[in-house]
Amino acid sequence: MPISGESANGPTSTESTSKANVVEVATFRCDVGYSDGRHPDQVRYSKKPREDVARRDFTINGLLMDPITGEVLDFVEGRKDLDAHTIRAIGDPEMRFGEDKLRMLRAVRFAARFEYQIDPPTFAAVERLAPQIDQVSHERVRDELTRMLREGHARQAFLLLDKSGLLDEVLPEISAMKGVEQPPQYHPEGDVFVHTLLLLQNLPHPCPATLAWGALLHDVGKPPTFRVAPDRIRFDGHVEVGVKMAEEICRRLRFANDDTAQILALVNHHMRFAQVTQMKESTLKKFLRMPEFAEHLELHRLDCQSSHGDLTLYHFVREQLASIPPDKMRPTPLVTGDDLIAVGHTPGPRFKEILSAVEDGQLESRLQSKEDALEFIHREFPLS
């Protein structure tokens, strides 16, 4: 009875999940041929545990347990590699990776997550075969990268991705950050890649997937917008460029629409915190009530901690969140579209402008009642 700590499809019960004491059970088998680099051409069931182990990925995943006696069967020196903190492919590394190219990413993730080293011949095989990772579906690559980002050792995982050549293949936009200098007065930590790795290092654990990807992509627009101005290094328009690049990455990796929207929002708004103390009261309240604002605030904290270290604006925002009552943050509208029609306005694009202006006045306490709002509309938006 093979019992694996993690299946090819994701975590099993040996990790911290909501389902305790659950294991995955599979019949012994021997796979023959992997012409598509993912699925066996032929599956032959076997009664020999050694044959089953021979097709598995890494020695630490090749341990079997007899459910009757509790005896652990180790045909591949998995215990030795556990003791040595080593990720080693079972048998010929190129053959194992040829059976499923995703195993290259899994080798990186396991090494980072458990703080293990990758056996040199296994790592060399990853380096040689890295360009073939494009044979893996985008969804599977996305899920493996997301696990790397969320498991608490994202910085080490991305350093290994870079060293192995996999980063160039799966996320060339992140690889492009290497060596892109930043103004030292704002970023004494180093280039864009170093800065991004520091954010990944400081991600909370566990971490929402959208926040993790937002942290990874927040400065993705800097490499193509880099320029040395007379006063300092600048990245004009890097947010707008970054949003477009992040959208392409999310589309390429087949993210769900809701996740894509949140990741793009994180990239789009991460620089707005610099203006929070100068924002109008209405603008600030609208900013603070954005969907999943806690992720925006956490990204700002990570961004500051991974650069200049000044958390003044972070604390200002937290104070505002604590001091503004919910009914002042999201007040019941004083007027509606029906009210505009009732006083003679024709439905159309101008409705949004009028209602937004009224809301601003309400958020800034200039308009206290429906009568105030209607008088404001009559004065500022007269009927033609």
Image (cartoon, rainbow, N blue to C red):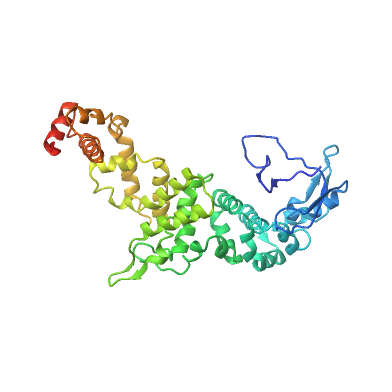
Q: Residue at x 34, y 45 (%)?
A: 315
**374 left or right, relative to 214:** left
Please identify the quadrant where the C terminus is shown: top left
Image position, residue 381 (x, y; %): 15, 38
Q: Is residue 90 left or right of residue 270?
A: right
Q: For the point 80% across and 46% down, which residue is it?
A: 64
- Is 348 or 224 nearer to us in this picture? 348
Q: Nearer the viewer, residue 64 or 286?
A: 286
Quarter-of-image position of residue 116: bottom right
Quadrant of the image containing the N terminus = top right
Front position in the image: 316 or 38: 38
- Percent of width and height locating residue 261: 43, 46
Image-quadrant location for residue 19: top right
Q: Is residue 178 left or right of residue 29?
A: left
Residue 142 percent location from the top left of the image: 57, 52
Location of residue 335 in the rendering, given as x and y in whole percent from the top left corner: 23, 29
